Each structure stands twice: as C-alpha cells, then as structure tokens.
Amino acid sequence: MAERALEALIDALRRLPGVGVKSAQRMAFHLLQHDRDGALRLATALGDAVHRMRHCQRCHTFTEAEVCSTCEDPRRDGRQLCVVETPADQAALERSGSYKGLYFVLMGRISPLDGVGAADIGAERLLERAGDGVVEEVILATGFTAEGEVTAHALSQALKARGLRVTRLARGVPAGSELEYVDLSTIAHAMGDRR
Amino acid sequence: MAERALEALIDALRRLPGVGVKSAQRMAFHLLQHDRDGALRLATALGDAVHRMRHCQRCHTFTEAEVCSTCEDPRRDGRQLCVVETPADQAALERSGSYKGLYFVLMGRISPLDGVGAADIGAERLLERAGDGVVEEVILATGFTAEGEVTAHALSQALKARGLRVTRLARGVPAGSELEYVDLSTIAHAMGDRR
Ligand SMILES: [Zn+2]
Ligand SMILES: [Zn+2]
C-alpha cells in the first residue's frame, strides 16, 4: 500500500474524542491539501504538551510548573476552595467573574457504571488540600448531571466529616447540563445563590 | 504563564476543520489526561504524512509513491475515468462496488465566490490525463451541490471539445448533498443510471 502514512494519520485522528472516521478523513485531507504548516505545528504542540504538562501539586490542573499560576496568585482568596470536574469547567467559572477563591480540579467524576470511584478522582488529595487550615468553605461545582451529583454527594460527606463547611452551586444551572456549556450569567447567579 | 504548552496545543487543534475552541479544549484535556500515547502517535503520524504523502502523477490523489495503488492496479478498466472532488468521494464510490475504472481526483471544486477556478483544480492535468488515447468515457462524479454542478459543467465542455465522451452520475443522488455522505445503494444506482 502506497497510502500507509495517510491511513496512520486517519487512525490517529480518530482517537480524538468526538471524531469519527469521516471527520478524521476530512481533517487528514484538509491538512495535507491546505495546511501542511498547521499539521507540523500540531505535531510539535502535541509533543511539547505531552512532555511539559504535568499536574499542579495544589489543585491538580495541568501546568508546566510545580504549582499553577492560579494557585500562585496572591490576589486569590485561599479561604474558598471550588471543586470542579475539568479545567474547562474552571475556565467557565473564571469567565463568569463570580469567584475569587482557589480551585481543586478533579479531572473526572465518580461514575459507578464506568468503574470510576472516589479514589480515581483524587478524593484523598482533595481532603488533604481542603484541610490545610486556611480553607473555610469548599464549594462543590461538579456538573448537575447524575454523575456530577453523585460526585458532589460523596465529596460532601467526606469533607463534612472533616468539619469543613461545604456548599453547592445553586440549582440555577439547568439540570442535565455540563457546566462548560452553561451561559455565564446563569453561572454567576448560581455562584451567588450557592447553598 | 505556566500553561503555554497547553494553550499552544489548543490553538493548533482549533485549526482542524470543524473544531471550535470548546472541542479543541476537550481534545487537549482528553489527550493529556487519558491518552498521552495517542497524542504522541498523532504527532508522529502528522509528521510522517506531511513528509511522505505527495500527489499521484496520474490521478492526483495522495500517495507515497509516484503513482498510487489504484492507478497501478492492472484489474482496473483504463477506458473509464471517473472525476471526483476528493479522496473521500473516491472511497465512497469504491465502497459502493459499482465502478471498476480509474479515477481523477480534483482535490477541490470550482467555486467562483471563493476565487477557485478551473486552473486551481487541475483542469489542464485532467484534460491531459483523459487524452491518453485509452480513456473512452469520462464520468463526472462531482457533488450535486451548486459548486459541484458548476465544476461538472465546466469540465464537461472542455472534455467534449477534445472529442471525449462525457457522462454524469444519474440524479439519483439527492440534490444539495455531498457525495461522501450519500448511502451506498444510491451511489450504486446513480452509477448504473449515468447519462
Ligand atoms: Zn494549581
Ligand atoms: Zn493515482
């Protein structure tokens, strides 16, 4: 076969989330026909990200340093710790401008059907982080999906058992939705009404 | 900023067709969190494809050799030449099992609004290829979109002026649709009913 490199590219693109075989073909043809520079830039960016990005030792989000720029920011209020599922959810909260505390990023959520438990989302690390003596309130901002609610419930119990004050974003967020797709004023209201 | 490599990856992913900022974020987080091997494999595949894939000297599709495996196949009927917009369209025709001739891949289509004319889709190269003395029939299988029809019309006139027999896939293909998304039996019928 004289098209092996093309097949390999289509296969590799298919591993991206949300990309089926037809999208992968389109992407491969587009890159080869119209954007070879973009293809090489993407190759470099992938290698750089894999080799440089690790997890922040305080909040567990992705960073190139020991501790991420948010955790390092002296203007953030260390008495509040907001727990989110993903960096995208954190970014949505940041864009809403309704929060000035710190974060903890689970990088997932409890999903009994997929065999993902509290240990897999770093619950121990969260309990340790929240028990630093500075944190006064832990705001659970996991999604309002079935799995997000299960996650919030499990974390809430463990955090309360340690004597921490635990709140949850108000139910202004439409049920069944992922936080990152919610409009910003809804997020801001939910932050203000947290209970 | 301690997240530069991540930002660069998201930017590079956004250049893929059909990928907006949120999809790019999801892809980047997924790769870093769950599939670093896949990320490195994609980086390698991109580099390999860019460095190895060029255009077939006979049909203009992507190949690593001078001439692609389809053009080299002695079982194909050299008297028929089917003109398609993209390798994906060619793949759809192949899957329909309705055609045993050779192909010419335009790698585009005439689009006056985007300033894409006959020269940009290699019309000269097609006329040369079709005039090899072996080709008896040129089957125009460009899409049944406005641009696909314009392309077929322009190529048809040029090919007929050279004394070639020109046919078009039958209008069984639903109007307004891209060939690669048409179901295979419709393609097979349209091939049988070509006029
Ligand atoms: Zn951090
Ligand atoms: Zn060829």
Image: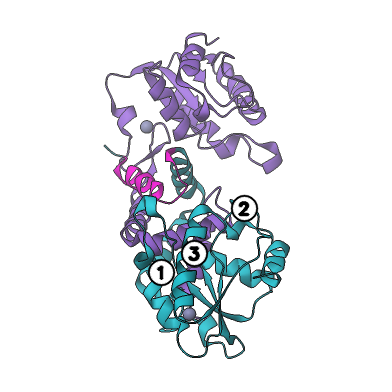
Chain colours: A purple, B cyan
Relative to B174, is B81 on the left or the right? left
Residues behind callouts 1 and 2 on a single chain: yes
Nearest to the eye among marks 1 and 2: give it: 2
At horizontal 39% and vertical 64% (from top left) the residue drawn is A33
Answer with mark 3 or mark 2, whichever residue precedes in sequence.
Answer: 3
The correct choice, above or below, for A151 with respect to B95 in the image is above
Nearest to the eye among marks 1 and 3: give it: 3
Residue that badge 1 annotates: B49
Relative to A162, is A149 on the left or the right? right
Ligand 1 placement by image quarter: top left
- Output the chain of dot 1: B
Relative to A79, is A8 on the left or the right? right
At horizontal 61% and vertical 66% (from top left) the residue drawn is B92
Residues behind callouts 3 and 2 on a single chain: yes
Nearest to the eye among marks 3 and 2: give it: 3
Q: Residue type at mark 2?
A: Ala
Gap between marks 3 and 2 measured at Cα: 16 Å
One can see residue B2 in this view: yes
Q: Name the foreground residue: B49 vs A107.
A: B49
At horizontal 30% and vertical 41% (from top left) the residue drawn is A65
Residue that badge 3 annotates: B153
Principal secondary structure, stretch drawn in magenta: helix
Q: What numbered label is drawn on residue B175? A: 2
Q: Secondary structure at mark 1?
A: helix
Q: Residue type at mark 3?
A: His
In the rendered structure, which segment of residues is drawn in magenta? B3-21
Answer with mark 1 or mark 2, whichever residue precedes in sequence.
Answer: 1
